[in-house]
Amino acid sequence: MSGAPPRPNPAAPVSGPALYVEQCQDCHATPVGARYAQSLHSAEGIRCGQCHTPNGHPDFAQPVQDGKCGGCHQSQYQQTLASKHFATRELRALDADRAARQALRADAFTAPTAGGGRRFVGDSSSGELGGRLCTACHYDEHRLGLGPVQRADFCTGCHVGREEHFPGPTPGLANRCVQCHVRVGHTARGQVVNTHLFARPGATPAGR
């Protein structure tokens, strides 16, 4: 991730391009500012205007799209574009309908399927790359981290009928699906290597 450059004159009043505006919390103190302050983005110096669409004042009516996340997280973004989650997303025109976007966010950026499960929703008005997959998995009220993914019911909320994987009840445990479908190995130093392709264990990328 790359932090924002300093304002041309830090002692001057806050103004100029959106990425230089640092005092968003003056107006958006709670809950947005407080939650953002807990995020890794905040610790890395990422400014609000770098993720939200600038238009004099950042346009918070426009949601953060996958491509925006890909500006810093390029490898994860490319894996997401090649994933089955991206290929099977349901496309809806969202940019011009704020109420629909708010409802979608409240519904974890997913839509129900005929089989009782759910699938991710993309944005047809943003072209073929329009999507909400990054926020669907990582949105945590401006903390944008691993918190949502680590919930025990995160994957099974969409992938119903997987009870045979864990026959015993395991309330309160973290999401165990990622142990087999995300983790692909370790580096020579023991660091965990994950993928956003969500492959079946032992499958090649073509068989995801």
Image: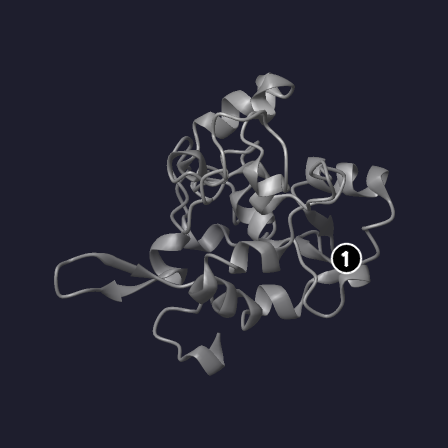
Q: What SS does tag 1 mark? A: loop
Q: Position of residue 53 (x, y in %)?
A: 68, 46
Vertical comparison of 98 with 82: above or below: above
Res 115 quadrant in image:
bottom right
Vertical comparison of 155 with 180: above or below: above
Q: Position of residue 124 (x, y in %)?
A: 79, 62
Q: Position of residue 116 (x, y in %)?
A: 70, 51
Task: Say which residue appears at 54% left-offset and 35% top-offset.
Answer: 140
Task: Say which residue appears at 57% left-offset and 45% top-offset.
Answer: 50
Q: Residue furthest left?
A: 189
Q: Which residue is mark 1?
A: 114
Q: Nearer the viewer, residue 170 or 20?
A: 20
Task: Say which residue appears at 38% left-offset and 48% top-offset.
Answer: 176
Q: Position of residue 72 (x, y in %)?
A: 47, 56
Colour logic: one colour
**From the viewer's perspective, is 107 left or right of 35?**
right
Say which amino acid is labelled 1. Ala
Res 32 quadrant in image:
top right
**From the viewer's perspective, is 79 left or right of 58?**
left
**From the viewer's perspective, is 119 left or right of 69?**
right
Q: Residue furthest right?
A: 96
User: Can residue 38 be spotted in the picture?
Assistant: yes
User: Can residue 196 be spotted in the picture?
Assistant: no
Vertical comparison of 141 with 34: above or below: below
Q: Residues within 10 Å of mark 1 (few under 14, many from 20)?
A: few
The image shows a total of numbered marks equal to 1
